[in-house]
Amino acid sequence: MKAALHVAVGVITNALGEILISLRPPTVHQGDLWEFPGGKVEAGETVQQALKRELYEELAIQVEAASPLINIHHDYTDLSVNLDVWRVDTFSGEAHGREDQPIQWVLPDKLTDFAFPEANKPIISAVRLPPYYAILDDEEEQSLLTRLDKILEQRVTLIQARLKSLTSQQVTEFFANAQPLCRAKGASLLINSGVAGFEKLTADGVHLTSRHLMALTQKPPVKGWVAASCHNPAELLQAQRLGLDFAVLAPVLPTLTHPTAASLGWQKFHEWVGPINIPVYALGGVSRESLDTARKMGGQGISGIRTFLS
């Protein structure tokens, strides 16, 4: 089997929060499609060196600060690629197509309006997803909105409502009050699939339990994000196979509520997430301060129940 082409890819962000994309020439592989710029990692180069070289050659910019975003392995019928994708948050120079390729600066949520190669599509999810994913549990029904307010005050913009012990009527009433609060803060509110009557709610997406995940044969046709809870490599592979937008892998570290329960540890998290082509959040025993570690280990960010309530 031919080795995959190793490509360094840059997700370049400007001061307005826009992302730079460029149009591939019609004569190359996956031509006439938009892409995140980058190029082949040459022999003897590190990924960072290749990223800096390629972005200077293509766009005339100097990369000053970059960090890992996601690693993607994809098999086309005629080519296998390994996309090593990095966030480029700081650069100097004015970007322009040095090879006469069209470029555009696009807001993250508008990236879905453009046609990309198949291998680039998980990058769009990773770009659009925030670093933090809060879980709102229903252990205290009366304080749900109070806790939601605390989460929103922390500027968390992705929240899962895991309200498994409430009735359908209680859940409906909660969403009627919660969604305007979330929309006012630019936050997305997902519903857990273990919630009674979750299909009838106009949530911003659904978070599948691992049991529901493994029972599916295709991605649910719901509006918004589709995510899943995973606890082992088989569940992660299923989430990838279905083309879900992201997954949560747990438990990474021991938690206060289950201090003696078996946990993965960061090394196993890294090993399990590495082959997966969708963004994965780390859950269990993590804090805001764990974000850099999660990203270095291949994660999208961190998720938590109590993490965002202090």
Image (tube, rainbow, N blue to C red):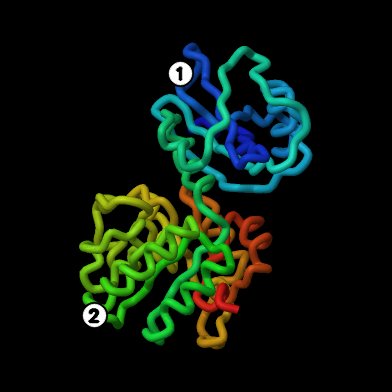
Neighbourhood count class around disc 1 (C-alpha, 10 Å): few under 14, some 14–19, many 20 upward: some
In the image, 223: left or right of 34?
left
Q: Label 1, on which residue? A: 32
Q: Label 2, on which residue? A: 167
Residue found 58% across the figure and 16% down from its top: 101
| Amino acid type shown at disc 2 | Thr
- Tell me the element at label 2: loop
Q: Nearer the viewer, mark 1 or mark 2?
A: 2
The image shows residue 135 at horizontal and vertical percentages of: 46, 71
156 relative to 82, above or below: below
| Amino acid type shown at disc 1 | Asp
The image shows residue 40 at horizontal and vertical percentages of: 63, 28
Residue found 28% across the figure and 81% down from its top: 166
In the image, 251: left or right of 60?
left
Quarter of the rendering occupied by the C terminus: bottom right
Q: Is 149 in front, or is 62?
A: 149
299 relative to 119, above or below: below
The image shows residue 10 at horizontal and vertical percentages of: 63, 36
Q: Can residue 251 be seen in this view?
A: no
Q: Which of marks 1 and 2 is nearer the N terminus?
A: 1
- Tell me the element at label 1: loop
Neighbourhood count class around disc 2 (C-alpha, 10 Å): few under 14, some 14–19, many 20 upward: few
In the image, 51: left or right of 262?
right
Residue found 50% across the figure and 47% down from its top: 128
The image shows residue 35 at horizontal and vertical percentages of: 52, 29
